[in-house]
Amino acid sequence: MCTAIISVDPSSPVPVLLAGVRDEFVNRAWEPPAPHWPDRPGVVGGRDLRAGGTWLAVDPAAPRAGVVLNGRGRLAPEDRRASRGELPLLAASGGEPGTLSLDVFDPFHLVAAEPGRVRLWSWDGDALTGHDLSPGVHLIVNSGLEGAGGPRSAAGDEREDAYMAARLAHFRPRMLTAPRPEPGFGDEPAAKAWGAWLPLIDGDGLARADHRALLPLIDLGEGKVWGTTSVSLVALAEDGARYDFSAVPGDPAAWTRVL
């Protein structure tokens, strides 16, 4: 149940703001953001230690960013399945998913962002679609842009659909009415840089078990716990990028500056 929140304002000195919430099994190992990939010099992101890719990547020199969410649809064959973690690296490097053999990927939503353009790509296992995001605030979840895209979950996943709908219903109006920040690229701390956004991205005071939670934490039993393991905030301007990161979701004091 990952979430991406994107604000596009071509008139702003910082035209693109991106919040990336990563949900995963909490015991899945990963490393914090750094330039982990020698074949992608300059690209920075957290690295998943199981598959080697990332959920969000930034190239500050471009500047560009890419973030991936699981999608809905037909799964790739297990014997040929590739990690979706390579897709943000591709997007941050200026590539497009249409250049790949997509039948090896499970369904996904991929955001490719740069100051002059933000494009959302969606793959459902059969077809790839893409369109540019218009000015405004956009929320993307596993069921697509504003929860309106892709087939429904498989039987038994009704709770996931209900949680996503509740999350959108709670956070979308708050993101729309919150004053849009214009993060600077100096030494200002995250609280000053992100202003009214930060309390919302830190969870808006909701308990992590709340069905509306942006930062969920769900005990699935048998030692399996699923929830938000990190949160990223990225600002893109013509002259650079800012990247703030929290490995302790919901803790206002846990934000660190990556770029």
Image: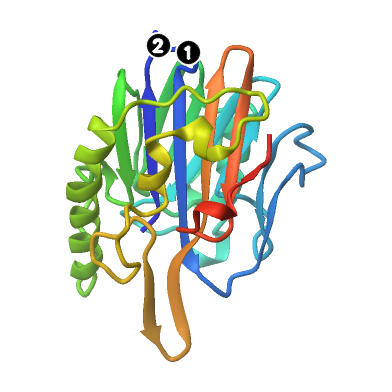
> Where residue 206 sits in the image (x, y, percent)?
29, 61
**What amino acid type should be assigned to the residue bearing mark 2?**
Pro
Residue depicted at x 45% and y 17%: 15
Residue depicted at x 43% and y 67%: 227
Q: Is residue 37 left or right of residue 52?
A: right
Q: Earlier in the sequence, mark 1 or mark 2?
A: 2
Q: Is residue 24 left or right of residue 65?
A: left
> Where residue 248 sits in the image (x, y, percent)?
55, 61
Name the residue tied to disc 1: 116
Q: Between 85 and 17, which is closer to the camera in this rendering? A: 17
Residue depicted at x 40% and y 11%: 10
Residue depicted at x 36% and y 51%: 71
> Where residue 59 sits in the image (x, y, percent)?
66, 29
Q: Is residue 179 left or right of residue 45?
A: left
Quadrant showing the N terminus: bottom left
Picture quadrant of residue 163: bottom left
Mark 1 vs 2: CB contact within 8 A = yes
Picture quadrant of residue 63: top right
Colour setup of the view = rainbow
**Tag on residue 31?**
none
Residue 102 to residue 133: above or below? below
Q: Between 124 and 85, which is closer to the camera in this rendering? A: 85
**What amino acid type should be assigned to the residue bearing mark 1?**
Gly
Q: Is residue 22 visible?
A: yes
Name the residue tied to disc 2: 10
How would you rate the neighbour count of disc 2 (Cα within 10 Å): few for under 14, some for 14-19, many for 20 or more? some
